[in-house]
Image (tube, rainbow, N blue to C red):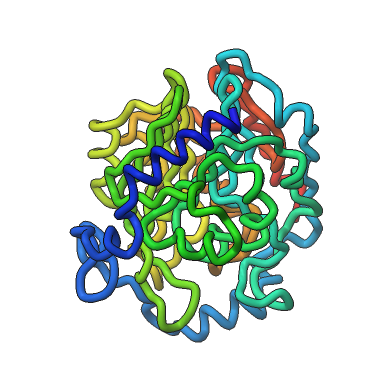
Amino acid sequence: MGKIFLAAALIVVVVFATYEKKAVYASENFRDGKFHNLTETPTGISGNKLGSIYRILFQSGKFSPKETIKAHRINPAYAVSNTEGQLQAVWLGHASVMLKYDNLKIITDPVFSERVSPFSFMGPKRFSDINPIEGTDMGFIDAVIISHNHYDHLDEKAVKALKDRVGMFVVPLGVGEYLKEWGVDPLHIVELDWFGSLSMPDMKITATPAQHRSGRGYFDGNKTFWASWVIELGGKRVYFSGDSGYTDIFGNIGQTYGPFDLALMDIGAYNSKWPYSHMTPEQAVQASVELGAGLVLPIHWGTFTLSEFHWKEPADRFTAEAEKSGLKYVVPEIGQPFTVGGYNPTARWWDNYK
């Protein structure tokens, strides 16, 4: 598969040659030097901004587990195995998911760092004892999809660990510059605007709207884009929300690209100080219904403290709302594989921790 993707990469570079700075400037979503959501919404943090940042950075213990969460170690043999026509997934923590179909493998928002922060010595720290799998054990990865440039989604350590074994990094406009800086061959990077697609044998990846923001420092707000993603593997369809507030985009995406066999939905960074950038768990359930999701994997929770609620709250609220709505869901432990259409782990494993 590696040779196929390298050859395809050469074609992609020609087709998407303008998806550098010119594509950023040409995007209808880029105005006045920055990217915009479909509906203009405040993208900053309202209220006591410094107070929220201080509590997340220095008082996260009151929101975090009192003990280390045990993650499953993934057998490297599983990572490179053929699923024989089954769609399988493994939650690697936060927004990182390994998707497998036949001999295809996709990773969303891989994060290997212990902290999601500009600093190695402070900032939100991983709850679990291990990363479920090391980059060297993943074998060849057909595509890595990155939703946006925030530290909990775009991780320098993960990119550097994976860069020589990835067929294609698929990212929103502007994010490719980080990858190049970290040593990724430009032949293996595709930057997409909303509704742009990358097609490969038995695989198609489409960037779709999300309501969010970007930035890794004080002065670079919304200079790069953000996206949700539609992933087609063989005859299966997966939706990856990335980070997004709740809007009517989900119904539109469901009508255009759905229904979906699996939806990976952000449930865990909501806050009244940034209501337009993340969904509440209840909104994530509603969005999943509008997408036409046959099964939902809640993500973006249980790994780092990124807001001001107890770490269990997102899962408690999501599962309660899903039960009321009749939505099918799966809540595996970190590193626990599952098959879409097969056994779906729904045991409340988080109740075993304080």
Residue for point 24% across, 31% down: 255
**Residue 36, image x and y in percent?**
26, 65
* Horizontal side, residue 188 vs residue 66: left or right: left
Q: Which residue is nearer to you in this view: 41 or 173?
A: 173
Q: Quadrant of residue 254?
A: top left
Q: Which residue is nearer to you in this view: 61 or 42?
A: 42
Residue for point 41% across, 83% down: 219
**Residue 344, image x and y in percent?**
61, 25
Residue for point 44% across, 40% down: 10
Question: Furthest residue to the top?
Answer: 84
Instruction: State whether residue 352 is above or below residue 202.
Output: below
**Residue 6, image x and y in percent?**
53, 37
Could you tell me if residue 190 is visible in this image?
yes
Q: How many marks?
A: 0
Residue for point 46% across, 64% down: 177
Could you tell me if residue 323 is visible in this image?
no
Q: Which residue is nearer to you in this view: 270 or 162?
A: 162
- Quadrant of the drawing holding the N terminus: top right
- Quadrant of the drawing holding the C terminus: bottom right
**Residue 263, image x and y in percent?**
45, 35
